[in-house]
Every structure is written in C-alpha cells, then in structure tokens.
Amino acid sequence: MEITMVLAALKVVGYGIGTLGPGIGLGLCGYGLCIGSARQPEIAGKLFTNALIFGALAEALALIGFVLTFIF
Amino acid sequence: MAFELTGNPLADIAGPIEELSESFNSAFVVDFGNGFGITQYTVWMCIICVVVLAVVLAGVRKVDIAPKGKFAGLIDWGYDAICRNMGEGAIGHGYKKHIPFLATLFFFIFISNVIGLIPGTKTPTGSLSVTWALALVSFIYFNYYGIKAKGGLGYLKSIAPSGLPVVMVPIIWFFEFFSLVVRLLTLAVRLYGNMFAGHVILGVFAIMTQFFILDLINFANPVGVASIAWFAFLFIMYVLECLVAFLQAYVFTILSAVYVGLATSEH
C-alpha cells in the first residue's frame, strides 16, 4: 500500500480518537444542563447560556483536531 | 455514464467519490489570471446576499404597512427571537445596539445554509474562506466592543476572571487568552465542518443509491435492492441536515452574542 494512503488513514483514525474526549465533555455538558434546568426551571435560560460557553470550549478540542488533519 | 460498471457497487464507487470531492473544490468560474477569479462559492454568496436583502426587506415592509401576513410574521418572529433569546439572554444590559449585527449574521448564515440544501446549489458556508471571514468579523466586533467598554488595558486584565489568588492570575490569564484567540478558529471551523461534512455525506449516500440501483437494472444483481436502504439513509440525513442548517446558524449567532456579552460585561 502507498505510504500516503496509510498516512491519510492514520489521520482519520487519529481524529476519531481525538473526538472521544470532546464527545464525553459535550455529553456531560448536556447532562448538567438537563439536570440543572429540571431542578430549577426558573434559571434554565442562564444555564443554557453557560452550557453553550462550556460546550464551545469542549468542542474546541475536537475542532482543533479537525484542523490538524488538514495541516499535517 | 462515464464510469465502467463492474457489477460490484462497492468497487465502482472510487471514481465518483473523486468527482464528488472535486465538486467541492472552489474552482474558478471566471478566471482573471494571477490566482484571482470568481469561484462558484462567490457566485452563490452574491445570490444569497440578494436573497437575504429581498426576504428581509419584503418582510419589514409588510410589517410596516398592513396587519402581518404569514411571511412578514415569520420574519418578525425570527427577529423577535433574536432580540429575546440572544440579545436579552446572552448579552444582557445594553443589548439593543448589538441586535442588527446578530440579526444580519443569523439571517445570512441561515439562508445560505438552507439554500445550500437545494440540490444543484452550493452553500457558501461550506467553504472555509467564507466562514473565516464571518468568524473574523465576529472576532473583531466583540474585541472592539470589549476595548470600547473597558479600555485597552482594562480589557486585557478582564480576560482573567476576578477574585483569583494573585499567584494563579498569570496562569489562568494565559489559558483564558488562548481560549479567546481560539474562538476565531472554532467559530470558523464549526460552521465549515458541519456544512461541508453534511454535504459530503449526502453526496456519498446519493452516489451509493445510484450505483446499487444501476447494478439491479444492468446486471440483475439482487444486492441492488439495498439501494432502498441507501435512499432511506439519504432521506434521514437530509432531514437531519435541515435541522443542522438551522442549528449551526443559531449556534454561530448565539456564541457571537455570548462573546460580546463576556467582553462587555462589568465583571
């Protein structure tokens, strides 16, 4: 097999591994939002904004990985 | 058909996949030479700018004159939702002056995402250059308003949250500064990645449907019945993409609003 093909496949595998952490993080973020707004529905709007901020932070890691597959 | 059919759908697919990835390249429609030119994404972006203007102006005009029709009511509802959810919810005090910026972002991204779903069109947000430009506008916007609200030095100081032990401040400041700079990248890549990957998936499923059904017709290969399943996948993914088109426009806009709110808030 050509070495470039192997490298391309490895990139995809690496990105797949790299999404595991952000996936767990986003899941926890959504879990916390649901639990929090079920317990105290009156601050659900505020919680939603915070959840978006931390979701964006967690997702940033996956997106950096996505960019790295293009760069290398 | 330019491709040779061999009777094995999975072996036939390599050629069209290459053609599919070529169709996402921003090849020049009009070439001015020296690396300048008008790409298909640029053409569609201009069309979408006109559509956005037409839609919003038509909506606004009807609101002014007569009791609201369905269309004008829809535009009004969208604008109102931006005011309430994004403005009041995410920015808080003094949100009114940011609403035009957020509404422009939302309507442009949403309409370009939706128009990109029509077969044969290109979504400008599926091109990294367009999303970089949008993210850069948003980035400069919230930094400008942050510096305007707190002054240059005050804004730099406010990157680290207040109330930390003195020893921790430089470390936390560095991490917060990094996450602030990375916002530019994540805003751009989130939108691009979602739209681009969605369209590639739709394209692959469409190609698979086509090849399996061609095998059924040309070779009477019973494997071709699987094209029903591929078409079902295509349909489900298309429905999902309709949701994603709205969701990504919403996420981009509300994140911009949240960043503006963080930059301009008092503490």
Image (cartoon, coloured by chain):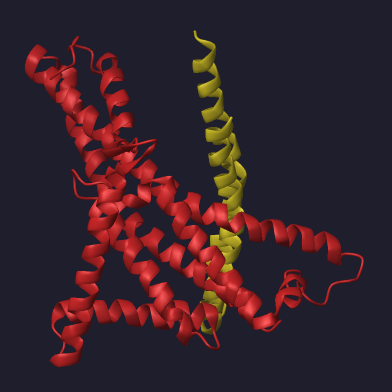
Quick check: can you spot residue B197? yes
Chain shown in yellow: A
Q: What residue is rendered at 40% in x and 82% in y? A: B83
Q: In this view, does B104 lie above or below B70?
A: above
What quarter of the picture does the N terminus of chain B occupy?
Answer: top left
Above or below A56: residue A67: above
Q: Quadrant of residue B114?
A: bottom left
For the point 28% across and 33% down, the residue is B23
Colour assignment, chain B? red
**Residue at image point 69% right, 81% down:** B150
Q: Which residue is drawn at 54% across and 80% down?
A: B91
Provide residue B255's location: percent of width, then percent of height: 51, 66
Specify the quadrant of the image occupied by residue B93. Answer: bottom right
- The reply, left or right, for residue B134 in relation to residue B227 is right
The answer to whether one can see residue B265 in this image is: no
Q: Which of A29 and B208 is in front in this view?
A: B208
Side of B19 where B184 appears, left or right:
right
Report x, y in % for residue B7. 18, 11
* Image spot of residue B30 (x, y percent): 25, 40
Is A55 drawn above or below residue B80 in the view shown? above
In this orientation, which residue lies closer to the viewer: B265 or A36? B265
